[in-house]
Image: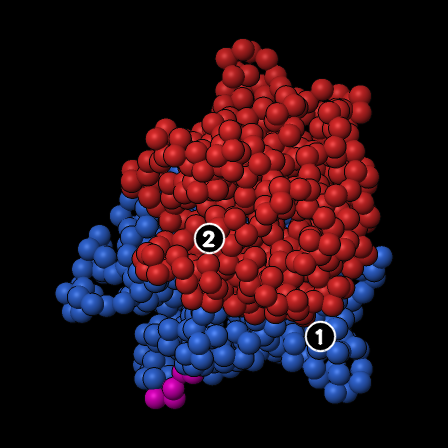
Chain colours: A red, B blue
């Protein structure tokens, strides 16, 4: 029988996280800055909200960082995740390409986010903190933080963007089932939230606002650890279990990807899958193209500026050097909530800047079309975020057909879409538009980047 | 590292389905009857809605029936499913028991139903039919039939109980994404539906009504195959891939279940997991208790009558000898929609009648409490149906603690609960009741069983 799945046993769960910083040809990443002084953020400043081991990981240039045994044990509940050859999709596309996908939807919360939710909870618990606080947009990350808190006996408070809090009651209910308090943001719980509500009682919220509320809450209570779902170096690091497994699974398949494709919001799913392949290439291994796919509604890598900017809208947190659309940018309400980030993780940004990773932006209508096609041929219904990688994978496969040549394509299927059927309903009803970011809005937001004011 | 997961490779996907009829000590199952003549249903009569190979399987007494290669290939997309040792739950319960669960939630539709949706679509396609028609309650089965139709290039029409059609728009959207037409039942598409709507325009529908509509539709169009999600012998047969895998996985775990627990509505998940263990026992293998768990709202095995009765409410289909509450019984609207069946599969019924399987009924509040506990310790959020098996597994484990002795407990986790968060929300809000079936309603419904009228 032809092989479809390439599985690893729980004993093959990675023992270390892989750190791209060790292999970047242009030297270390730019430091994050204290927003008041614009000096590099010190460890002492970071320690206000983060435990030591996570600070170590955030700043590390070591290639490998050991995964604690207790974290690895939890990983084995759903890891290693399967690598699947999409034979049925290949046949439907009539392509000579070989298409593989790395499927993270089997995690308890249905996406890759627990890969970092678990270790962040673990290290905060170890540091004596009794609760976690964070922000979430569509809720994938909030669910994963809630799971981490439940597993390590901690409380959790999640500020959820108000419009999602209203539109996605099931994601909220999942967090609450794990024991988490889920607060619609902007809220009256924080000074930031109260100020925004005073100005606009009907504010739908944004990820930047929710982040400001979470940061303010964490800063006011030393028993709470602030955790985050993407962008930061240590978060990207935790996700590299995905790519390390995929490297071994491609070997089992006796194949090697010519191209690795991931969707990109904060960048953690892309980095998790692609960095181990990229690192091997940088150390003299086989060539591989990496493609980051973002929504046309939030074109951070393809239309953003490389500059120091805030991750949160109120400017409470540090400045990161990254591709950014401006911390005031509010993307159109596309269904890939997890990709609506104005800035991207500095390590992904740097890899794009250095020409190591390509970037492209696609509209959500074409993505959902790809999602329907995938469901009907491969069965799994992809999350709207994941359809961005899928869309480009299909386009690559169709190009192979046109060119009459085979290529090996690997894409990240970051989560299932069982919480996202509203998007598929709207697509089926013809009610979906791409919600492309307009140039005027982009220009306005770019003018708000701190570097832009200085220049 | 201690073992948590017991995995099989795709090459270990079962090659045959296991047929309990070959091992029943009391001889063959009672035949289904033609409702007009009360004579055993003939092959010719069955052929009106079913292709030959499925009729063969329905009537077979062979122990093993080969799985077609094309079906097995599709199975390998998500099979073999994992067997997981619930170490974290054991620790939380402080029990000496060893608890394992067989997890079917990784299937594309999130439950075990595609195990039969795929072969039923395959055989109907092979017989030249171009479309499928069926009924569904909560939608797990409808999604699986939709998946089967999509995979074999067929149309599908699913009559969905109207109250679920309204309450579970996401399940409906999943079917529609697979390309299926999903019709709220009772509908104006059938004579049965029109008659019911004329009497009661606001009828919320029932599984029995939806079944009558599907049967009428299939009978009127030879291009359509009627398919069904539980109860029938061939459906139970298809689900035995679950138990066959579990038998091998328990061997890998170097353990053997003292008790196997499954939730029971039509009986296919229970049978799928338990029949291979039961068959081995009947052939002289190790002892094992089997427990069927049904909702107190629909206590078919524990409070029903063993008699010939219809599976559908209008009496269009054949009569089956089974535990039944009466085909007119409408169970209270508990959240385990998949367990709201007035009758149970004849093979399960017979095994209970012969004392080979025990039965118990539990209220949904205690089930949801178990579901929350499981989510917080093991991560996976169980479907409300699955929480019935889980509840009894936990109770068995607590009994082990009281008795100070270890037992090996295996239960079926038939699906994830990501479509069922409304149930968890209501549980958290304290708005859930057990909705226990009342004696007056049970007596009324029992009086409607054909045998009851004859007697």
How many marks on residues? 2
What residue is shown at x 35% (from left), y 61% (from top)?
Answer: A198
Look at 69% across and 39% down and name the residue there. Answer: A31
Query: Compared with residue A104, is residue B284 higher up or lower down, i.e. above or below?
Result: below
Find the magenta span and give its range.
Answer: B436-440
Counting from the top left corner in percent of width and height, residue B101 is at 67, 64
Q: CA distance from mark 2 to mark 1?
A: 37 Å
Res A201 visible: yes
Alpha-carbon neighbours of circle 1 within 10 Å: few (<14), some, or many (≥20)? Answer: few
Q: Residue at x 61, y 77 (%)?
A: B392
Disc 2 crowd, CA 10 A, few/some/many (<14, 14-19, 20+): many
Q: Which mark is residue B92?
A: 1
Q: Residue at x 78, y 67 (%)?
A: B256
Residue B429 position in % (x across, y down):
44, 76
Compared with A335, A400 (above or below) is: above
Coordinates of residue A209 in the picture (x, y in percent): 46, 53
- Magenta segment's dominant SS is loop
Left or right: B201 in relation to B97: left
Q: Is residue B437 magenta?
A: yes
- Is A370 or A47 nearer to us in this picture? A47
Question: Can I make out residue B171 in this image?
Answer: no
Q: Are marks 2 and 1 in contact (CB under 8 Å)?
A: no
Asked if marks 2 and 1 fall on the same chain, the answer is no
Between residue A340 and residue A416, name the one nearer to us.
A340
Identify which residue, A34 or B107, lies in the foreground. Answer: A34
Of all residues, the one furthest to the top in this rendering is A403
Q: Chain of mark 2?
A: A
The image quadrant that residue B87 belongs to is bottom right
Residue A209: give its label.
2
Left/right of residue B46 with respect to residue A354 in the rendered view: left
Residue B41 placed where, x, y %?
A: 41, 59
Q: Is residue B316 magenta?
A: no
């Amino acid at each position: 029988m032809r092989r479809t799945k390439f599985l690893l046993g729980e004993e093959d769960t990675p023992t270390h996280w892989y750190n791209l910083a060790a292999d970047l040809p242009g030297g270390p990443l730019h430091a994050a800055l204290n927003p008041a002084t614009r000096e590099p953020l010190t460890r002492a400043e970071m320690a206000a909200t983060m435990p030591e081991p996570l600070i170590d990981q955030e700043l590390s240039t070591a290639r490998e960082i050991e995964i604690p045994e207790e974290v690895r044990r939890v990983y084995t509940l759903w890891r290693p995740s399967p690598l699947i050859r999409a034979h049925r999709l290949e046949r439907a596309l009539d392509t000579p390409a070989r298409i593989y996908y790395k499927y993270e939807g089997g995690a308890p919360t249905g996406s890759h986010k627990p890969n970092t939710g678990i270790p962040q909870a673990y290290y905060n618990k170890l540091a004596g903190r009794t609760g976690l606080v964070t922000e979430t947009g569509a809720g994938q990350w909030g669910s994963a933080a809630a799971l981490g808190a439940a597993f390590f006996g901690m409380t959790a408070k999640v500020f959820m963007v108000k419009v999602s809090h209203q539109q996605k009651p099931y994601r909220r209910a999942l967090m609450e089932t794990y024991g988490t308090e889920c607060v619609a943001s902007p809220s009256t719980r924080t000074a930031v939230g109260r100020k925004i509500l005073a100005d606009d009682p009907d504010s739908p919220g944004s990820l930047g606002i929710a982040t400001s509320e979470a940061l303010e809450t964490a800063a006011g209570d030393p028993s709470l650890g602030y955790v985050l779902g993407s962008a930061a170096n240590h978060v990207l690091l935790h996700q590299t279990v995905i790519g390390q497994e995929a490297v071994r699974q491609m070997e089992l398949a006796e194949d090697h990807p010519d191209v690795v494709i991931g969707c990109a919001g904060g960048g953690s799913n892309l980095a998790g899958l692609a960095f181990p392949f990229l690192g091997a290439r940088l150390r003299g291994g086989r060539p591989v193209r990496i493609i980051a796919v973002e929504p046309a509604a939030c074109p951070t890598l393809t239309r953003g500026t490389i500059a120091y900017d805030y991750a949160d809208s109120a400017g409470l947190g540090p400045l990161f050097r990254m591709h950014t659309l401006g911390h005031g940018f509010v993307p159109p309400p596309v269904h890939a909530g997890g990709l609506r980030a104005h800035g991207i993780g500095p390590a992904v940004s740097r890899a794009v800047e250095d020409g190591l990773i390509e970037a492209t932006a696609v509209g959500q209508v074409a993505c959902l079309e790809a999602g329907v096609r995938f469901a009907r041929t491969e069965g799994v219904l992809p999350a709207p975020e994941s359809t961005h990688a899928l869309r480009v994978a299909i386009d690559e496969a169709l190009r192979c057909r046109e060119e009459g040549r085979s290529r090996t394509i690997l894409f990240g299927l970051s989560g299932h879409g069982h919480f996202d059927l509203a998007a598929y309903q709207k697509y089926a009803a013809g009610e979906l538009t791409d919600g492309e970011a307009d140039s005027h809005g982009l220009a306005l937001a770019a003018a708000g980047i701190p570097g832009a004011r200085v220049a």
